[in-house]
Image (tube, helix red, strand yellow):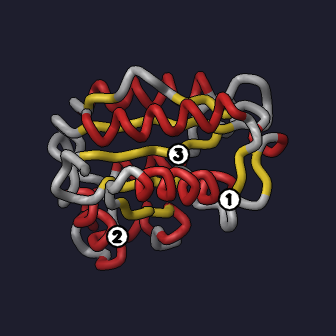
Amino acid sequence: MTTTSSPIVIIVGTNRPNSMSRKIAEYYQDILAQLNASSIILDLVNLPHDFTVSALYENSGKNEAFNDLKSLLEKTDKFVFVVPEYNGSYPGVLKAFIDGLPYPNSFANKKAALVGLSSNMQGAAIALSHLNDVFSYLGMNTLALRVKLAQIKSHYNDKVISNALYKELLEIQAGQIIHF
C-alpha cells in the first residue's frame, strides 16, 4: 500500500524521442506498480516545441499544453526524475521546464528520487548533483539514494535490466520514495 494519495510523477528528463530515459521510466513505473503505488509518466518529449517563448516569462499561463503539464505537477507531492547526462550535466530542456514552473511553490516541500543514466562510467553523478542543487534551492527534499546507471546501454535490453545491482538499487529507491 502506498503512503501517498496522489500518483508519483515520473519525469523523463529529456525531450529526445524514444529515449533510454523513457525506457527506464517505464521500467521504474513497473516497479512502483509491483509495490502497489500509482504513477504517471511525464515525458518532456510532450512539451510544446515553442514553450520557451510561448509559456515562460510574460507568456506565463498562456500556453494550454504547457499549463496541462504544469497542473499535473501541482497535484502531486512525489516525483522520480530519470535524467540522462548531457555534456556533464542534465539536459537544458529539463532546466527550461523547471524554470517555467511557478516559483517558489512548484517543488517546495515536495519529495523526489533521482535516477541518472549515462553511456560513460559516471552514471550521471555530476548531472544528479547539479539537479539536486537546484532542488535544494527550490525547497524540494530529495532521497539520499541517487541511483546512477552507468553504461546503461550495456545493461538494458528489451525491457530488462541485466545488472543485478542496478535492479536492486531501483527497487530499494522505489520503496523509499513511496514511504518518504
Determine which residue is flagged by label 3.
Answer: 82
Disc 2/disc 3 C-alpha distance (Å): 20 Å
Which residue is the site of mark 2? 66
Which picture quadrant has residue 65? bottom left
- Position of 163 compared to 173: left or right? right
Residue visible at 36% across and 27% down in the picture: 143
Residue at 55%, 30% (x, y): give it: 169
Residue 33, label in figure:
none
User: Along the horizontal axis of the image, is 146 left or right of 100?
Assistant: right
**If you read the primary sequence from the N terminus, does the residue marked by circle 2 or circle 3 appear first?**
2
Q: CA distance from mark 1 to mark 2?
A: 21 Å
Looking at the picture, tell me which residue is in the foreground, 144 or 92. 144
**Kind of residue at badge 1:** Ser
Q: Residue at x 46, y 35 (%)?
A: 114
| Residue 127 point in image, percent of width and height | 57, 30
Q: Quadrant of the C terminus?
A: top left
Percent across and percent down for residue 1 are 25, 51
Sequence order check, earlier mark of 3 and 1: 1
> Can see residue 109?
yes
Mark 3 residue crowding within 10 angstroms, few (<14) / some (14–19) / many (20+): many
Residue type, mark 2 in image: Phe
